[in-house]
Amino acid sequence: MFEMRVEDVFTISGVGTVLTGFMQSGSISVGDQAVCKTRSREIKIRVAGLVDASSKPIKIAENGSTVGVICKQLDLSIFSDSLQSRNGYNVIEGVILSFAPRSHWWG
């Protein structure tokens, strides 16, 4: 099972919304579907790209790595209930990225 606790989220013009964090379990690949869970919502996303801690593009991210997950068509406003300010910095709390539940065993 894939799970990543989101530590930061931002938008790069022309690229998409980037969710960064530490992979707590499993792995994720470009093209995978996942669920972004905030305190009040669950949003299905598709992974458009991945970058490692040095911002180099990668095809797969595995357990124990720090990674940026790039998503298209994900609005930053969905994180408003999870965004807090500490010492002048924005901090995301309670946001988890995990695999999307499948509706059929074959799909």
Image (cartoon, grey):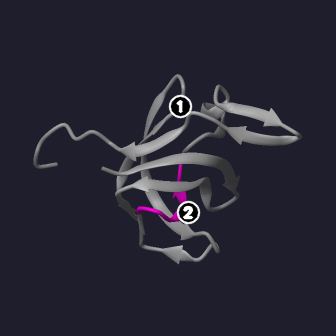
> Which quadrant holds residue 84?
top right
Please tell me whether residue 48 is drawn above or below residue 41 in the rendered image. Answer: below
> Which quadrant holds residue 67?
bottom right
**Residue at left 63%, top 35%?**
93
Q: Which comes before the other along the chain, label 1 or label 2? A: 1
Image coordinates for residue 19, horizontal then vertical, percent = 58, 51
What secondary structure is marked by label 1? loop
Q: Is residue 65 magenta?
A: yes
Q: Is residue 76 left or right of residue 39?
A: right
Please tell me whether residue 97 is drawn above or below residue 50 in the rendered image. Answer: above
Image coordinates for residue 54, horizontal then vertical, percent = 64, 74
> Which quadrant holds residue 13?
bottom right
Q: Residues within 10 Å of mark 1 (few under 14, many from 20)?
A: many
Asked whether residue 31 is in view, the answer is: no
Q: Which mark is residue 57?
A: none
Q: Is residue 82 left or right of residue 101?
A: right
Image coordinates for residue 25, horizontal then vertical, percent = 38, 54
**Residue at left 57%, top 54%?**
21
Task: Identify the amino acid type marked 2.
Answer: Thr
Q: Is residue 29 magenta?
A: no
Please tell me whether residue 51 is drawn above or below residue 102 in the rendered image. Answer: below
The residue pinned by badge 2 equals 66
The residue pinned by badge 1 equals 38
Q: Is residue 49 left or right of residue 60?
A: right
